[in-house]
Amino acid sequence: MAEIAVDLERALATRAVTGGPGRATARVLAEGDGWTVSDVVCTSGPRDRPFEEQHSRVSIAIVTAGSFQYRSAAGREVMTPGSLLLGSAGQYFECGHEHGSGDRCLSFWYEPAWFERLAAEAGARFARSGFPILRIPPLRALSPVVARACAGLEARARARWEELAVQLAAETARIAAGLPPVAGGAALSAEARVTRVVRRIERDADGELGLATLAREARLSPYHFLRTFKQLTGLTPHQYVRRARLRRAALRLAVERRRVLDVVLDSGFGDVSNFNRAFRTEFGVSPRAFRGTEQARQDGRRRSFDPDGRRAWPHRA
């Protein structure tokens, strides 16, 4: 969370220099059919007067830095890092900064029908008024998804954010409804469906393989597919696809002479810098260093054989 807090401090410092009232700035990170995720930085402080706003969609916001007071007709809550702000579509609210300046939130917004369908699949149902509570404090059950969201704040991979949007909505809905976390193994029929998807990924790792596409292939809802896939493979679909693409890219770098950029584009990565970071994380070296090492190894193996294919042993003096 340290770098996230530093970014907030920079925004507050800029406001102090330029003057003017505090304001909230939203930067859209990704969006899909029924969901949007944005990085929202607010520079308001004790001297800024809160004003009434309205949630146009269902809102689940992860507080990543700073603090503020969140009020509605349902009550008042203090929002701190790691907690989740819950907002129902049509709900009026105010956010105040009486005790300190600034906050930063990772805000997920959902179309009401999309969220209601996903919540129902997760076993949670709400009255027409929406969430029965305004806040979920930092909980162990939500720590993994919150950590993944904060770690990927600068990521551009739409498939990754789609998974996080589904997982956060489903788990938040269950907790808000007073239900325990989902447990249990996968059925044999689900195993067959996930296996079919895994084979599709291995055949077509470079293709468009978002959560919705893979869930349709498995004939499961996105929520059930995401949960079942991770139970059976130990990875989310996005993580699995990314590693399959990295393996394929590594093979191409080792045996082909094409430019690294061409390998990147043909491997399903649209951004070279993201590919370089992912490749270094996976293999411990840069793509160019990996290619140089592998091709040197291959050249060494070729030199160790004579033209007839026999092992060429060094001559003794």
Image (spheres, helix red, strand yellow):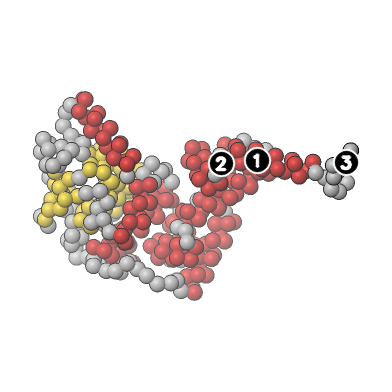
List x then y, in percent, for residue 39: 30, 42
Per the image, the residue denoted by label 1 is 293
The three-letter amino acid code for the residue at tag 2 is: Val
| For residue 94, above or below residue 48 | below
Confirm or deny contact between disc 1 and disc 2 (CB under 8 A).
Answer: yes
Point 30% across, 50% down: residue: 108
Per the image, the residue denoted by label 3 is 316
Instruction: Single out the mark in the foreground, 2 or 3.
Output: 3
Instruction: Single out the mark in the foreground, 3 or 1.
Output: 3
Point 76% across, 44% down: residue: 301
Q: How far separated are the C-alphas under marks 3 and 1?
A: 29 Å
Q: How far separated are the C-alphas under marks 1 and 2?
A: 10 Å
Say which quadrant the C terminus sits in. top right
Per the image, the residue denoted by label 2 is 285
Q: How far separated are the C-alphas under marks 2 and 3?
A: 38 Å
Q: Tell me if 310 is positioned left or right of 202 in this view.
A: right
Point 24% across, 28% down: residue: 14
